[in-house]
Image (tube, coloured by chain):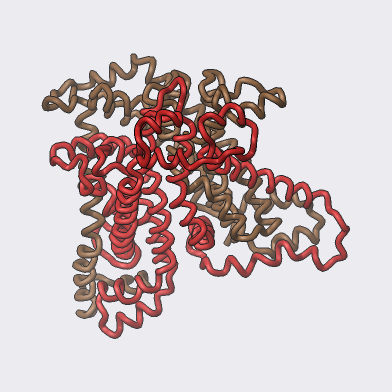
Amino acid sequence: MSAIATPLRTSRAWRPAVGQRPARRPRPAVRPGRVMAWVAVTVVIVATVFPFFWMVRTAFTPAAGLIEEAGRLWPTDPTLVNFRRVLGLTSVEESVAAGGTGAAIDFVRYTANSLLYAGSVAVIQTLSCAAAAYAFARLHFRGRDALFGLVLAGLMVPGIFTLLPNFALMRELGLLNTMVGLVAPALLMSPFTIFFLRQFFLSLPTDVEGAAMLDGVGSLGRFWRIALPMSRGPLATMMLITLVGMWKDYLWPLVAGSSPETRVLTVALGVFQQQSPNTAPDWTGLMAGATLSVVPVLLLLVLLGRQLVQSLNFSGGK
Amino acid sequence: MTRAMTVDLSRRSTPAVPRLRRADKWAAAVLLFPALLGFVLFYLYPTVRGVYYSMTDFNLLKDPGFVGAENFRTLVADPQVWTSLRITAVFALGNLVVMLVLALGLAALMQRLRLRTWVRSLLLLPWLVPNVAIALIWGWLLDANVGFLKNLLDSIGIEGVTFYNPDAALWIVVGISVWSGLGYTALLLYAGMLQVPAELYEAAALDGASETRMFFRLTLPLIRPVLALVLVVSLIGSFQVFDLVQVGYGNNPIPEVRVIYYYIYQQAFAFYKMGYASAIAILLVVILGVLTYVQMRLMRANRSDLS
């Protein structure tokens, strides 16, 4: 992977030339290839967005309109009742009348749980892994490469293999259905994050650190005062990627923390679905719940879309 | 720098250097401590325990009793293990091939059309949404009675694409998985394509190479490291498909979509056969290890033609 060490910032400089080159020549009015390309991209975008539009549309549809207006792009009589009953703001009778079961999602609480779960792991794991990555990239100690190899081997182990003993461990420690037990396995360590940040540290120019070393700054100081501030970008990238991953996490929170106190949004949505009868699913309610669960993600995309895309460019460019 | 620092760190070098090195050791211990604590407690220790469990009849209720290789003998004779593995392999292969072809195409389009950042971030939307919500959305779109997409497909003559149709279910899960990962994968590949120097394309264009030829002769070989990474990551990910099935098809999914992860989950958390579940998980570890190794060898992943 020699490409990994190439400086990443240069990628932008290469960009314009690729597409702009033909512009110098007089271009024909319509180039069939380009039209086809735009058509293809449009199809992909519509296919990507439409299911989410349909989810929102259904969430605003009264249960009665579900069948009558199955083909309409927007219900004639949009309603908020599905959101209200999913949030538990309606009586059971009203909920049943609207096609529900009376089941509700304590949305605020589960979102808070999700944020706590994803946020704490994203921040702490990234910092803890950054420290280790720096040691692997810059320091010298016996068994370093063997240790790094061992850590990397963790990448290939499917999650469920360690999930089973981790579950047993949390059970023995009485930490099932506690936030501590929930975050513990991922809190300090991720082989991928260590791998990624080590690659970054290896690509950092060493002259600043070298100068600091000559000035008598120790290894810890060089990590804390030089390497960390110089890697804000990759650290933010890793935090964001981890945040998204933990936000979507389902299996571990399902087995280790499905009680209401620690239930995260994904588990709550699954539970809500399982309360809905299989023969006649409460689609309007389910879509209202799904919509609510997508709102935080949409906010993230609107606020950080640019950074997200660029950070992927960054991680993929390696 | 690291190299220069250590080239002659033998015991006989100047006194200053060994002191630095000792400082290094302590600093390394401090820096590594948190991550290694996590590694030992939640990776290494459970690995040892998982291997031990696989040789016991552990069921969460009583202490594990040693049974030797019995779990593995049961496993070999258990048709559901092999059925689940076959289903998972079909899913993984379908997911990998379809996703890769589409993502390469999309990435090439991104490169050529120079899509704006907000358009690219739109393509990232499904990657941000939990599989749980995605399973629900698609379950509804393909609902047998009033599913919008199902009706649409019916009207153009493609029938039977309903969520619970046993013949279609596995391919539907493949489709959903591709749909949700496409934008993300394409962006990763696109990022790899950005690293290819523009001069190469200019030179190729001067030589009269077509776009197609440039793609296959230039782009594809030069993004091999990213391609290899994406392949390995998606392969390992594909073998772990679970959420889509468990939420989409409920706690008792139709047999056609009982993937290996679901089977392990069921053995462990529905039947409390922790020992047996661990044995199947070990089989999965071995399979993934072999597949990853073969893939890395085939792709010669650690070498790029660039640079």
Q: How many marks?
A: 0
Q: What is the letter of the red chain?
A: A
What residue is at 34 percent from the left and 15 percent from the top? B78
Q: Is residue A5 above or below residue A174?
A: below
Q: Is residue B32 above or below residue A281?
A: below
Q: Quadrant of residue B77?
A: top left
Q: Is residue A150 above or below residue B147?
A: below
Q: Nearer the viewer, residue B1 or A199?
A: A199
Q: Quadrant of residue A72?
A: top right
For residue B204, say whether it is visible.
Answer: yes
Q: Is residue B283 above or below residue A204?
A: above
Q: Nearer the viewer, residue B21 or A290?
A: A290
Q: Is residue A268 left or right of residue B195?
A: left
What residue is at 42 percent from the left and 61 percent from the top? A199
Q: Nearer the viewer, residue B115 or B104?
A: B115
What residue is at 13 percent from the left and 41 percent from the top? A173
Q: What is the letter of the brown chain?
A: B
Q: Is residue A58 left or right of residue A87?
A: right
Residue A52 drawn at (x, y percent)? 55, 43
Residue B17 drawn at (x, y percent)? 24, 76
What residue is at 55 percent from the left and 30 percent from the top? A66
In the picture as drawn, the residue positioned furthest to the bottom comes out as: A215
Residue A194 drawn at (x, y percent)? 35, 56
Q: Nearer the viewer, residue B266 or B128?
A: B128
Residue A135 drawn at (x, y percent)? 29, 64
